[in-house]
Each structure stands twice: as structure tokens, then as C-alpha cells.
Image (cartoon, rainbow, N blue to C red):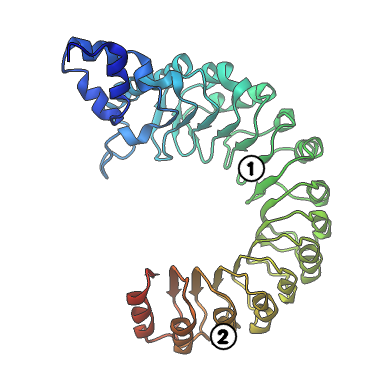
Amino acid sequence: MDTLNRDCLSQIFLNLDFIERVRLEHVCRMFYYVLHQQSTFCDNVKLDISQFLINTSTDYYQQDSLSFLPTVVGVIERCGRYVQQLSFGQRWLRISQPIIDCIADNCNRLRFVDLGAVILSADLSPLLERIAPQLQEFSLEETSWVNIQCAEKVQNYFKDMKRLRKLNVRSAMFKLTKLAELPSTVRSIEIGGAHSFPSEVLIKFLQEHADLEEFRASPAPMLDEDIITAIGSLENLRHLALGHSFNTDLQFDQLSNLTKLETLRLNDVFGLSEMSLRLILSRAQNLQQISLTNCKNILDYTALGCCGHLHSLEIRNTTQLGNEDLFTLCTYGNLKRLTITNCFNVSTRGVNIALMRCQLKELTINKCGLVTDEMMYTLASTQRELETISIQECASITRWEQARLFTSEQKLAVY
């Protein structure tokens, strides 16, 4: 061991797990010295702090753990210089000011920061002052704040995020009044469930970010015809999610301008009619995923036949979806994922059409009383690629023998 210099030891230690390296610090002085050179941890470009913590059902939130702070600080001090992607695992850990200060002092290469589903008892200003200009992805999804005044400071740094491409502020506890100050580099944004803010701010943001590729607002903080028009002008938009719009007079025809759409998710959008849906789907020739939940003003779903490249279809809570609505769609043979929930007029015949014409990977049928045991026989005789099947509250399905037989032949998860 004496013949190995420190550079050799450093390269050897790089082949060990992070925790094993920390344990080796106690072996001898040389190990301690080498392991406290940050180059020994240069392979830790991605860091998920939650992986280094012991969680139990009794102290899941870590509030009373005396080892929590020194553990987190110890990890960051060792490898922070090389970390570009940081996360706390979305496990509702309480993040205090010393932890944020430690990140600010040690992690000067951060590009991707995920502070989603944590309890922030801290001011992010010291961190954002240093990393805002280099951030590419930033998530505050469902983040809980102990001090709302600290939350309000976040948007003061929007104008400094010159390289930001993806922002997630779902359920933001602060009003996004400075949303329009975000740079034009932003390509993806999630604002679902955020506190309501002036519609003029959102319209200005949409007008100044013409290259936006992903826009998610379900539930939408606000939605009116001017906002829909602004969304419809986003020529490069590929992913759209809107929800909780209960105005039945609202028109959605402007969304037909989104010809590059690949994913469309609409939940509780009461103003969407079957005519608007047909107009949207007929022009979005690249659509691969559609999810429509509780859209009460859609009186028929024949427009689904316009989607020749659709891979995933999810329809929930409607009496208007019928067997014939699935026929044309399934003739293309491209469907891989089918979810039908609480659709009383879909029967065995409709599901069998999908099973006979498409090789599904995932099938979910819930609360469909007209789907019977016959579907199980069709499933067993036609499907070769199915990986997951979920059937719940379908009163007419009484026998699962075929599914069990099918499971024994393939790696199929049955729920």
C-alpha cells in the first residue's frame, strides 16, 4: 500500500460506492487525506440526497433526526464541486437554511435543480444568486414553504435565468406575477394549480415565448378566450395539458392551430365540444397520446378516427364514448396503451376491437359494466406484447382463469 501514491488511490476509490468511500476515511491518515480531496468524488455528476438517508414510517419527514443535517452537509461538501444535477428525491424532506447555504457554497456547476415535494424552511436567494444564470431545469413542484415571504423572492431571479429551458412551478404558493420575465430560452413550463395571477401576465408570457414546446396548466390558474388564442399561436407546441375549466361557453377552436401536437391532455374542460375536438385532432397529424377526462360537452368521440399515429388513449368519465368510436382508430393498428374508465356505453365488442387490431402493452378497464368475460378470452388469444392489465369494478367480469393462464405464459402484471 505504501508504494501507491495518492493519485493511484484516488483512481481506485472512484470504483467504489460513495458510502464505501466515506467508510474508508477511517482506515488510516492517508486514506482520509486522499478521500478528502474532492477529485475522489468527481464521478458524482448527479446527486439524489434522499439515497443517503434512512427513512422509516415513523420519522419519514426527518424533522427530528439529529443526523439529517450533518449527513446532507457531509455529502455535499465531498462531491458538490462536480455535481450538475441535484435532487432531494421528492420525499418531503425538510430543507433548512444551512443546507441551502452549503449547496450555494459548494455546488457551483449546478444545471438541473429539483426541489419538488420538499418542505423549504429557507430562503433560496443565496443559491439562486449564484446559479440562476446557468440553470437549465428548475423544479419547485408541489414545494411547501414555511415562510411565504421566502417563496415570493424566487421570481425575482426569473430574469437572471438566461439559459433556463424547463420550469416546473406546479402548485406554486406564490403568485407568478413576474412570469413574463423568464427568458425566451424556456421550452417547457408547468403551472398547474399555481395561485391565480393576472391573465395579462400569462398572455404576455405566451406571446413572448413563441418557441414554447410544452405547456401544462391542469388545473389552470385561469383560462379565457384570450389565453386560448395565445396558446393556439404557439406553432412549435408539442405537449399541452389543460384542466378544470368549467365555463361551458368557452371556445377551443383556436387550439386547432397546434399542428405539431404530440400529447394532448384535457381534464374537466366543459367548454370543449365534439366539433372543436374534431377540428383539433384533424389538424394535429402527429398526435401520439390523448387523455380526455370528464369533458361533458363532447357528445361523440368519432373524431378519434383522425388520429392515425396514436399510441396511447385514455378516456374517463363519459357516457358518450361508444364501441364505434374505437373502430376507426383501431384500424390503424398503432395503439399500445388503452385506458377506459367509467364509460358505461363501452362494451366487450369495443374492447375486443382494440384487442384484435392492436398489440397492446397496457390495458386498463375500470367501471365498465358492459365488458364481460368474453373480453378475457379475446385477450388471451390475441395479445402477445401485453405487459400490464388492470380491471376494476367491472361487474360482468367474473372469471379470471384466462388472465391467469396468460400470466403464466408471459411476464404480465395483473391488477
Q: How many marks?
A: 2
Tell whether 30 sits left or right of 392: left
Position of residue 343 relative to residue 253, above or below, is: below
The kind of residue on which mark 1 rests is: Ile
Query: What is the x, y in percent for residue 113?
Result: 52, 30
Tell whether 144 sits left or right of 251: left
Q: Residue at x 57, y 32 (%)?
A: 138
Position of residue 229 relative to residue 169, above or below, is: below
| SS for callout 1 | loop
Position of residue 387 relative to residue 68, above or below, is: below
User: Of 142 and 409, which appears nearest the observer?
Assistant: 409
Q: Residue at x 71, y 63 (%)?
A: 270
The kind of residue on which mark 2 rests is: Ser
Q: Quadrant of residue 48?
A: top left
Query: What is the x, y in percent for residue 352?
Result: 55, 84
Residue with the mark numbered 2? 347
